[in-house]
Image: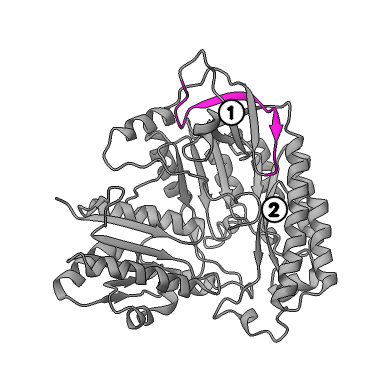
């Protein structure tokens, strides 16, 4: 019997992408995914260091797994990701039952480190200061048969005062366009219909090899990949957003009419203190030009409430930008100190009760606007890529769920006179009802268009230990985060 594994992922889309690589590496080394309800032989925590209490959550989860390990001889625990890069040997000191600690730059070392820890019977800590192998060159075990991530860059050259990512993932490293397109073509040949291009600042792609127009060129090149039906990307930085990218989005048939672009704050003074090298007027100008080129584009964002020094006037400026931008949805965060960032040491921290009160006002406004924007979809015919696991009430309502081209979640009634669509298949349907967080289409959908993505999903069901987890491809969920 092969040893079994489980990967637990925290944090951003890049971590999710890394976790697929970790799973691929382990399966390449002879491990298999643990069956549901069983204790694995190896548990891998792929961590995030963005939130203030990330380490507390990690050690709490490690403590729970430690009790399982005590009752299962030979079980191993590995900790990787951003928190491992930051805390290094501290993890082994606080949790001596951990077998392996590895960083963001040496994901590919995991199988060797696990074997070394098993043979030597002591913890292995390996943290590299620079990337040795680009993660997308490693084997992957994707969670979706019909949708995939493609990392085009890792690291970040910005110095936002609230963010620790540059310190943990290093300076931006860009992949060559030919390597990216070869990976996309391979994925499409494997049944993938939708890809999401990933980068810490995805639209600064090309900075390492001196081509400021590289990202727009890459989007256009994706349009030439036969069989690739949907292209998304996340997350762009407003300071690097150029008109050639807007043109590429509008003119490339498979680039979706959807943009996730972090705002963080609508106050120019707060943006200055954040070291965000744009101001509200520039941000709104980008949105205006995107909508001029793609009138039906759904625009989503990230917003931080209560950044140190934020006044009531600063917060009001954020509300003003939200009203003008008319976001389809947003990730909203109450500011928390990121250890190791400049903002954590700023003297004018906003009192928690003030942050909470402002946060409530922001979420209420976003909910109102999201609902108003969603209501505009009623009566429209939309193309839906059928998904797995996105509709929690589908079994009760007898609906299926999927994503429209603008990435809105649609719950729809399948055509009763046609075969039921598979995840990865495509239907068209007409929206009959809108809620802030989803759309409903209660008229019967079209006869499904059977796709290679649906074929790939069906084939995956015949393989052991496959899962049907929801794949949102990195776009923000609607409403306030849990």
Of marks 1 and 2, which one's residue comes earlier in the chain? 2
For the question of whether residue 437 can be seen, the reply is yes
Occupied quadrant, residue 315: bottom right
Tell me the residue that label 1 is attached to: 412
Q: Is residue 223 above or below residue 96?
A: above
Occupied quadrant, residue 262: bottom right
Secondary structure beneath dot 2 equals loop
Q: Is residue 32 above or below residue 256?
A: below
Look at discs 1 and 2 and give the one toward the viewer.
1
Badge 2: how crowded within 10 Å, few (<14), some, or many (20+)?
some
Q: Is residue 132 above or below residue 20?
A: below
Residue 434 forms part of the magenta stretch? yes
- Left or right, 98 with respect to 211, comes to left
Looking at this view, name the residue that lies furthest to the front. 396
Q: Quadrant of the C terminus?
A: bottom right
- Colour mode of the rendering: one colour
Q: Position of residue 127 (x, y in %)?
A: 35, 75
Secondary structure beneath dot 1 equals strand
Q: Position of residue 409 (x, y in %)?
A: 60, 39
Extent of the magenta region: 420-436
- Number of dots carrying numbers: 2
Q: Position of residue 306 (x, y in %)?
A: 72, 72
The residue drawn where x is 45% and y is 32% is: 423
Q: Which mark is residue 242?
A: 2
The residue drawn where x is 51% and y is 21% is: 448
């Amino acid at each position: 019997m092969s040893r079994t594994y489980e990967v637990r992922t925290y944090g951003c889309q890049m971590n999710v992408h890394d976790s697929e690589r970790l799973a691929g590496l382990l399966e390449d080394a002879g491990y298999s995914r643990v069956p549901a309800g069983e204790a694995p032989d190896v548990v891998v925590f792929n961590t995030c260091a963005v939130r203030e209490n990330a380490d507390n959550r990690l050690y709490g989860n490690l403590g729970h797994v430690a009790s399982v390990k005590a009752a299962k001889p030979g079980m191993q625990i590995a900790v990787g990701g951003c928190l491992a890069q930051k805390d290094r040997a501290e993890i082994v000191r606080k949790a001596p039952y951990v077998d392996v600690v590895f960083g963001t730059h040496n994901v590919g070392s995991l199988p060797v480190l696990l074997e070394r820890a098993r043979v030597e019977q002591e913890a292995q800590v390996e943290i590299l200061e620079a990337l040795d192998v680009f993660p997308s060159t490693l084997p992957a075990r994707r969670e979706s048969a019909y949708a995939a991530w493609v990392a085009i860059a890792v690291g970040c050259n910005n110095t936002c005062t609230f963010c620790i990512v540059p310190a943990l993932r290093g300076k931006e490293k860009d992949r060559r366009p030919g390597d990216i397109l070869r990976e996309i073509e391979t994925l499409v040949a494997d049944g993938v219909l939708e890809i999401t291009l990933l980068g810490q600042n995805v639209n600064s792609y090309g900075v390492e090899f001196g081509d400021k127009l590289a990202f727009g060129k890459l989007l256009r090149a994706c349009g030439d990949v036969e069989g690739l039906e949907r292209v998304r990307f996340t997350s762009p930085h407003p300071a690097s957003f150029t008109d050639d990218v807007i043109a590429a989005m509008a003119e490339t048939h498979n680039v979706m009419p959807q943009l996730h672009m972090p705002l963080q704050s609508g106050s120019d003074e707060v943006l200055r203190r954040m070291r965000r090298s744009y101001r509200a007027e520039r941000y709104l100008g980008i949105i205006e030009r995107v909508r001029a080129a793609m009138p039906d584009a759904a625009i989503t964002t990230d917003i931080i409430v209560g950044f140190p020094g934020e006044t009531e006037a600063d917060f009001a400026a954020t509300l003003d930008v939200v009203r003008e931008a008319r976001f389809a949805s947003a990730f909203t965060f109450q500011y928390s100190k990121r250890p190791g960032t400049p903002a954590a040491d700023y003297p004018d921290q906003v009192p928690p009760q003030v942050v909470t009160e402002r946060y409530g006002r922001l979420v209420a406004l976003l909910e109102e606007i999201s609902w108003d924007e969603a209501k505009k979809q009623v009566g429209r015919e939309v193309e839906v890529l059928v998904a797995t696991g996105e509709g929690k009430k589908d079994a009760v309502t007898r609906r299926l769920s999927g994503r429209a081209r603008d990435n809105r979640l649609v719950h729809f009634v399948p055509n009763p006179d046609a075969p039921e669509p598979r995840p990865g298949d495509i239907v068209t349907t007409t929206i009959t009802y809108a809620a802030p967080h989803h759309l409903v289409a209660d008229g019967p959908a079209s006869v499904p268009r059977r796709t290679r993505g649906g074929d790939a999903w069906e084939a995956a069901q015949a393989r052991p230990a496959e899962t049907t987890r929801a794949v949102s491809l990195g776009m923000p969920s609607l409403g306030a985060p849990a």
